[in-house]
Amino acid sequence: MTTTALQANMKAQRRDNIKTGRAHLLIVEDEQDLRDLLSYNLEKEGFRATAVETGEQGLLKAAKDRPDLVVLDLMLPGIDGLEVCRSLKSDKDTADIPIVMVTAKGEEADIVAGLELGADDYITKPFSPRVLLARVKAVLRRKQAVGSTDSDDHAIDLGDMIIIPERHEVRIGENRVDLTATEFKLLHLLAKRPGRVFTRQQIITAVHGGMSAVTDRSVDVQVVTLRRKLGERGSDIETVRGVGYRYRDSW
Ligand code: CA
């Protein structure tokens, strides 16, 4: 790819930055205080928000309204959040709707299960409105970026680091970073969705094609090596305790 093509490519990527303006959000939360808090903060930011109390209502509303994103509490009476997530993701009409889970501390196993069912992100109670808005906006932004172009071939511009998929090349400043094919795939997977948490199983599936010989532990080892090779930029790859790894989001 020529330098000009590369610059055009990166410009296109920046253009993907959002117009979240009137995105319609569906909130599924049984606790009234939290439901009101979520609605209030999201509407204040200009989103259109519909709030329901149960998983059953959430499924009906999602099918009928096709919201732009669902904010989904995991602990619900009746159909719980994971079941709602599974249903939404297995129905082709709702499978593309991004889901941000609302979880409690200590629910790491459920978070992992939700991410592997296809949820996009989560927030842990108690959360600040700033974190809520940042996560929701980031998920909507990633959604638009994926929808608008073939994001897998995009060069990824990360300030002084650039990832060029078609050349399998990573540069930090003037220097080319020497990565194995596996390390490159791992970095590319995380960096093309900054802020998105990937579970170890998702990493194994994406990077190794789900080879059963690859263990969670070997993913951890690969991350350690990758961080070391990236030097100061290595800290951009964050460990999310009990859940997995993500590339630092700039917000
Ligand atoms: Ca709840």
Image (cartoon, grey):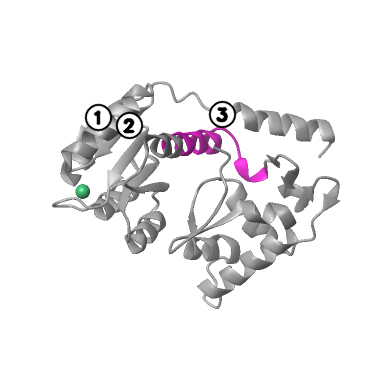
Secondary structure category for the residue under label 3: loop
Does the Cβ of the disc 3 residue fall within 8 Å of ligand 1? no
Disc 1 element? strand
Name the residue beneath numbered marker 1. Answer: 50
Q: Position of residue 196 (x, y in %)?
A: 50, 48
Do labels 3 and 1 touch, CB within 8 Å? no
**Cα distance in 3D space between marks 3 and 1:** 24 Å
Q: Callout 1: few (<14), some (14-19), or many (20+) C-alpha neighbours within 10 Å?
A: some
Q: Is residue 85 left or right of residue 57?
A: right
Residue 85 — which label? Answer: none
The kind of residue tagged 1 is Thr
Choose the circle earlier in sequence order: 3 or 1: 3
Residue 60 in view in this figure? no
Q: Badges 1 and 2: C-beta atoms under 8 Å apart?
A: yes
Residue denoted by label 3: 17
Tell me the CA gap for discs 3 and 2. Answer: 19 Å
Closer to the chain start, of discs 3 and 2, is 3
Tell me what residue is drawn at x 39 percent, y 60 percent: 112
Residue type, mark 3 in image: Asn
Q: Give the residue number, with chain letter if any, for mark 2.
A: 25
Answer few, some or many: residues within 10 Å of disc 2's Cα (few below 14, many 20 plus, some between 14 and 19).
many
Q: Earlier in the sequence, mark 1 or mark 2?
A: 2
Q: CA distance from mark 1 to mark 2?
A: 6 Å
